[in-house]
Amino acid sequence: RKLGIALVGLGNYATNQLAPALQETEHCYLAGIVTGTPSKAETWKRKYKIPEKNIYNYETYDQIADNPDIDIIYIVLPNGMHAEYTVRGARAKKHIISEKPMATSVADCQRMIEACKENKVKLSIGYRLHFEPHHQRVMELGQQQVYGPVQRIEAEDSFVIGGSPDRWRLDKELAGGGPLMDLGIYCVQGAIYTMGKTPVAVTAKFGEVTRPDFFDEVEQSINWQMEFADGAMANCTTSYNKNQNLLYGKAEKGWWRLQPSFGYSGIQGETSEGPMNLPNVNQQARQMDDFALCILDDREIPVPGEMGLRDVRILESIYEAARTGNRVEIKV
Ligand code: NAD
């Protein structure tokens, strides 16, 4: 049986990545949508042959509880809305995928986990790169110490934000923060799955604000270090004012580099031995199929809510380190 997914929030990511990916999935399909824009509902209904009864808006959202076609709700709203829509979705007894970052506070992440536990539904985070061959290779190289213990990690995910300064990504309430919440999370993730463990402490520094009309609520850029128990260090940067993405690891007897590293396609990898020669795949299709199989086989989720919570806790520590100038210990 194919599980039915309803996408909540038909913005860029849902429109250009998730809906097309759902045309390639084997264990789940696009069964429904939740949108506040009637014209989008009309377009999607025709394009993806979605039955009228599977189309909701934010007022009728809770009625999804009565719809047996929907097994999974995928929250693709601004970060500050993930918690509310996850909790309501869990109460409707649907399994949940929340986009990253899981939420804008540790307390919200905890609420989401609780609600899913209480209602006996599974909760996963949209960490697509766990299903991507180059990143899976990095996990192997680092965690299995193929070139010996990892000593140093460099990670950057940056892009120049354009458009209007009133977009939600620059709004503290809706985004939770600036590029750290949106992009830096990939560096945190990358360093942790290279090491196979979480950092013990962080230090951080905000970058200069050169576009104050855009960055009056959230940071423009931030640089931070994550320290691991065995002495390995990760140096990370994220900015909304340049284009760069990189995940590099240096071990005792070799190194690897993904560059570009965090995109939906076009990832390239090499090691000290030569090119990785791995394929680019549809990451989102793999991610959603894996979640569907976790439900169908009642298997443990590789990217669960607890991982989302862990990461938001680390992001909060990085902000604290940047605000105070202190080395902040991470207790997870
Ligand atoms: P977007 O701005 O393109 O879409 C957001 C959607 O939410 C829009 O359809 C908008 O109409 C709707 N919305 C409902 N209430 C809103 C409100 N009060 N303010 C603003 N919009 C509102 O954003 P996006 O790029 O699609 O990002 C959505 C989520 O997906 C974010 O959490 C983001 O971090 C995540 N995302 C993840 C990836 C990934 O690779 N995993 C990539 C892009 C985005």
Image: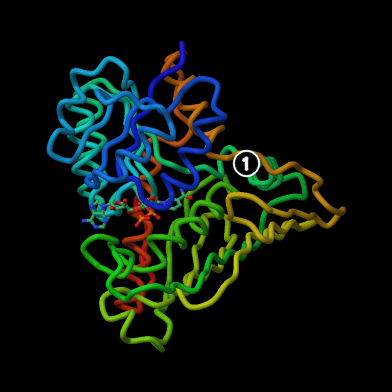
Residue furthest to the top: 1
Q: Residue at x 55, y 55 (%)?
A: 191
Q: From this view, report whether residue 204 is shown above or below residue 182.
A: below
Q: Is mark 1 within 8 Å of ligand 1?
A: no
Q: Position of residue 217 (x, y in %)?
A: 26, 76
Compared across the picture, whether 243 is left or right of 202 comes to right
Say which amino acid is labelled 1: Glu
Nearer to us in this view, 209 or 309: 209
Nearer to us in this view, 206 or 292: 292
Question: Is residue 168 among the parts visible in the rendering?
Answer: yes
Render colour scheme: rainbow
Q: From this view, report whether residue 97 is shown above or below residue 236.
A: above
Q: Quadrant of residue 84?
A: top left
Nearer to us in this view, 12 or 128: 12
Q: Position of residue 150 (x, y in %)?
A: 67, 55
Compared across the picture, whether 254 is left or right of 120 comes to right
Q: Quadrant of residue 121?
A: top left
Q: Residue at x 43, y 46 (%)?
A: 15
Dot 1 corresponds to which residue?
132
Q: Residue at x 71, y 45 (%)?
A: 141
Question: Is residue 309 among the parts visible in the rendering?
Answer: no
How many residues crowd mark 1 within 10 Å: few (<14), some (14–19), many (20+)?
many
Q: Residue at x 72, y 57 (%)?
A: 251
Under tag 1, what secondary structure? loop
Q: Position of residue 27 (x, y in %)?
A: 50, 20
Q: Position of residue 105 (x, y in %)?
A: 24, 54
Compared across the picture, whether 298 is left or right of 109 comes to right
Q: From this view, report whether residue 56 is shown above or below residue 172.
A: above
